[in-house]
Image: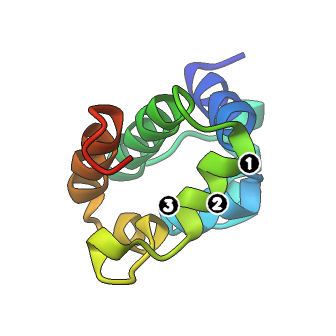
Amino acid sequence: MSAVARKLESIRVKGAMRNIEVANLLGTRPETVSRWNQGKAYPHSGTEKTLLELEFIVDQLSEFYDPNEARQWIFSPQKYFEGVSPAEMIREGRIDEVRRLVNQLREGVFL
């Protein structure tokens, strides 16, 4: 199993996300994610960076959410983002803002 496939597996297990959802977050096609999973292709550097960040976020969320709750959090509008979902933020390239909010959640600021 490649390193990329392990990251995708972690996102699937800890974040209850399917390839189509990961593809949507990364701005690619589900078929492309499937090829990464099989080791037949690798993401471009910018996409790989976002994939690594997404896996990190999902891993942090798994400390206090079960997989389905983590998935719902990512795709639900958030008050802190004025009704925008973390998924939208990630698609817009604003993943650093999502990481900051997850860090605040981990510290108990918004629990």
Amino acid type, label 3:
Leu
Q: Mark 2 packing: few (<14 Cα in 10 Å), some, or many (20+)?
A: some
Helix, strand or loop status at disc 1: helix
Q: Quadrant of residue 75?
A: bottom right
Residue at which label 1 appears: 68
- Sequence-wise first label, 3 or 2: 3
> Does residue 30 lie above or below 41 as drawn?
below
Helix, strand or loop status at disc 3: helix
Residue 100's label in the rendered image is none
Residue at 73%, 36% in the rendered image: 37
Amino acid type, label 2:
Gln
- Asked whether disc 2 touches disc 1, contact meaning CB atoms under 8 Å apart, the reply is yes
- Asked whether disc 3 touches disc 2, contact meaning CB atoms under 8 Å apart, the reply is no
Residue at which label 3 appears: 26
Q: Position of residue 40 (x, y in %)?
A: 71, 37
- Sequence-wise first label, 1 or 3: 3
Residue 15 lies left or right of residue 68; in this view the side is left
Residue 86 lies left or right of residue 8; in this view the side is left
Residue 88 visible in the picture: yes
Residue at which label 2 appears: 72
Q: Nearer the viewer, residue 110 or 6?
A: 110
Residue at 66%, 49% in the rendered image: 69
